[in-house]
C-alpha cells in the first residue's frame, strides 16, 4: 500500500494513541512501538478517510517508509495516455446520445469530459468533503469503539446529529479513543455547516 507521507494519520496500540500527525512521523512512532513490543501491533488510521493504513513494520525505518512511498514513473512502461502528465486512459461507458453530444464539442471528447468533471468537483467539493469527514468518523468509531459500552446508542446519536447526547454516552470510553473521535466528529460537523453557509 502507498500513502502520501505528509497525509494526516493517527496510530493506536489498543485504545491508546501513540502518535498523530504526518504519516511519515506516525509510521516512525508505530515502528518504534512495534520494535519495543512485537505483541502490541499498532493500528494506523488515515485521518481524512478513517480507513486503516496497512503497514509492514518489519525491517528498518527506511525500509518501512520506502514501502509506503509511491514509486515514481520511470518512463520504461509505455501505456496509453500521457503518463508524464499523469494522464491514464481508462474505459468510459456512455449511452449513444452522450457520445453524440461529445462528438459535437469543439475541443474534443476528452477535453469536454475533463471540463465536466472539474465543474462537478467544484460544485460538489463541499458536499464531498462533508461526506468524507463524516465517513471518517464513522469508520474510526466502528473500528475502535464497536465493542465499547453504549456504542450503538452513541452511533445512533452521531447520525442523528445529537453530539451532546453522543458526548454523554462516550464519556466512559478510553480517553484517547473518545478524544480522537470527538475531533473527527467536530470536523465532520464543521464540514456539514460549511455546505449550508
Image: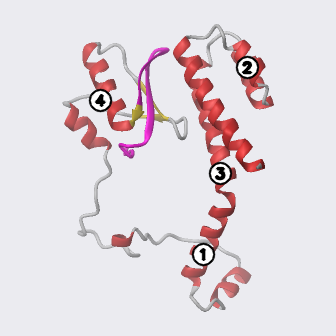
Task: Write the residue at 39% across / 22% down.
Answer: 42
Q: Badge 3: few (under 14), some or many (20 or more) residues near its Cα, within 10 Å? A: some
The label number, if any, that marks residue 128 in the structure image: 3
x then y, percent, for residue 53: 43, 35
x then y, percent, for residue 133: 62, 40
Magenta highlight range:
1-20
Mark 2 element type: helix
Q: CA distance from mark 2 to mark 3?
A: 24 Å
Report which residue position mark 1 lands on.
Answer: 115
Corner quadrant of residue 154: top right
Q: Badge 1: few (under 14), some or many (20 or more) residues near its Cα, within 10 Å? A: few
CB under 8 Å between callouts 4 and 3?
no
x then y, percent, for residue 183: 59, 28
Q: CA distance from mark 1 to mark 3?
A: 18 Å
x then y, percent, for residue 38: 29, 15
Task: Write the residue at 26% across / 14% down.
Answer: 36
Task: Write the residue at 60% across / 68% down.
Answer: 118
Query: Sequence-wise, which precedes: disc 1 or disc 4?
Result: 4
Report which residue position mark 2 lands on.
Answer: 166
Report which residue position mark 4 lands on.
Answer: 28
Query: Sequence-wise, which precedes: disc 4 or disc 3?
Result: 4
* Quadrant showing the N terminus: top left
In this rendering, position of residue 196 left or right of residue 119: right
Mark 1 element type: helix
Question: Which residue is more in the foreground, 16 or 22?
Answer: 22
Query: Sequence-wise, which precedes: disc 2 or disc 3?
Result: 3
Q: Badge 2: few (under 14), some or many (20 or more) residues near its Cα, within 10 Å? A: many
CB under 8 Å between callouts 4 and 2?
no
Amino acid at each position: 500500500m502507498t500513502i502520501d507521507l505528509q497525509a494526516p494519520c493517527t496510530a493506536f496500540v489498543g485504545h491508546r494513541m501513540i502518535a498523530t500527525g504526518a504519516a511519515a512521523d506516525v509510521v516512525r512512532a508505530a515502528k518504534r512501538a512495534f520494535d519495543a513490543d512485537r505483541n502490541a501491533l499498532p493500528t494506523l488510521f488515515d485521518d481524512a478517510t478513517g480507513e486503516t493504513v496497512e503497514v509492514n513494520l518489519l525491517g528498518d525505518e527506511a525500509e518501512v517508509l520506502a514501502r509506503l512511498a509511491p514509486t515514481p514513473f520511470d518512463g520504461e512502461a509505455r501505456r496509453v495516455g500521457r503518463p508524464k502528465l499523469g494522464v491514464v486512459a481508462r474505459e468510459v461507458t456512455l449511452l449513444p446520445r452522450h457520445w453524440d453530444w461529445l462528438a459535437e464539442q469543439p475541443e474534443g471528447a476528452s477535453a469536454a469530459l475533463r471540463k465536466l468533471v472539474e465543474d462537478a468537483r467544484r460544485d460538489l467539493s463541499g458536499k464531498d468533503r462533508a461526506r468524507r469527514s463524516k465517513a471518517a468518523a464513522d469508520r474510526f468509531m466502528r473500528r475502535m469503539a464497536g465493542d465499547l459500552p453504549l456504542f450503538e446508542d452513541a452511533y445512533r446519536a452521531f447520525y442523528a446529529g445529537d453530539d451532546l447526547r453522543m458526548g454523554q454516552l462516550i464519556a466512559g470510553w478510553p480517553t484517547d479513543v473518545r478524544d480522537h473521535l470527538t475531533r473527527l466528529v467536530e470536523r465532520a460537523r464543521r464540514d456539514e455547516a460549511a455546505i449550508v453557509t
